Amino acid sequence: MPTERTAVVTGVSSGIGHAIADRLQSDGWHVVGLSRTEPELPITWYPCDLAGSFELPPVAAVDALVHAAGFQVSGRLGDLDPDDGARMYAVHVDAAVRLAAGLVDRLIDGGRIVLIGSRTATGVAGKSQYAATKAALRALARSWAAELAPRRITANVVEPGPTDTAMLTDPARAATPPITPPLGRLIRPDEIAALTAYLLSPDAAMLTGQHLTICAGASL
C-alpha cells in the first residue's frame, strides 16, 4: 500500500484554498489545513491568523506546502492605505516565507511547494499593492526552486485570473470590479485546484521555478 501523503494548505475555509483542500483529500492526501475559520471539510485543521504570529502545525513530515490564503484591497495611487499593503504583504509573502522556512526540514526529498499568486502580478491599474505582493511570490518560488533542486523539491506559482469566489464581491476591492474574461465566464475554484493537484503529482516532477497562469484569456 502506498504511504499517505501529507499536504499543508493555507486558506482552507473558503475560495481557492477550500477547493484545493477538498480536491487533495478526495485524491487521498492527508490535508493539514490552516485558516482563521474552521472549514466544512474532513481534514485536520488548525486555527491560524497568517497576518499575525502563528505556530507551525505539528507534522513530522510534509510532502507538499500549498499557500493559498489571500485577500485583496484595491485602490489607485493617491488613495492607497499603507496599512492595507502591509497586511497583504504579511499574508501573501511573509506568511509564505515563515511557512516554507519552518517546514523545509520536514519537507520530504521530492516534495512540492505551490504558491497561489495572481495574473495581476504583471501589474494592473487599481491593484498596485496587491499586484506587488503577488509578483513577490514569483521571486520566492524561483529562488526556492534553485535552492531546493538538489533535493528534487519543486516550487511553482499558480496565477489565477478572475475566479468565482467571495473575494470578487468583497467591498475592499470594489474599486476594481471583475470583468468577464474572453473565454466567457469566470474561472471555477475547482479548476485552480485541478492545476494545483497536477503540480503535486508525479507527472510534474520536472516542472519547477515557473508561474502558470490560468485566466480564461484575461491576460491576453
Image (spheres, rainbow, N blue to C red):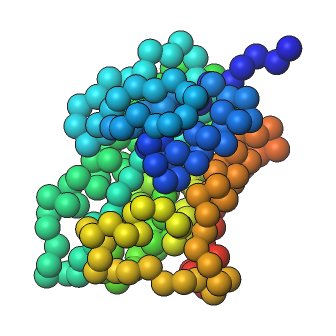
Depth check, front residue: 197 or 169: 169
* Left or right placement of residue 134 versus residue 112 in this view: left
- Residue 106 appears in the picture as rendered: yes
Residue 43 against residue 168 in the figure, above or below: above
* Left or right placement of residue 145 versus residue 175 in this view: right
Q: Residue furthest right?
A: 1
Depth check, front residue: 11 or 101: 11
Residue drawn where x is 16% and y is 73% of the image: 80
Residue drawn where x is 59% and y is 45% of the image: 20
Residue drawn where x is 55% and y is 34% of the image: 41
Q: Position of residue 38 (x, y in %)?
A: 40, 34
Depth check, front residue: 111 or 84: 84
Q: Position of residue 142 (x, y in %)?
A: 54, 51
Location of residue 112 by image quarter:
top right
Q: Position of residue 156 (x, y in %)?
A: 59, 50
Q: Position of residue 16 (x, y in %)?
A: 52, 53
Residue 156 against residue 189 in the figure, above or below: above
Quadrant housing the C terminus = bottom right
Quadrant housing the N terminus = top right
Location of residue 27 by image quarter:
top right
Residue drawn where x is 30% and y is 72% of the image: 173
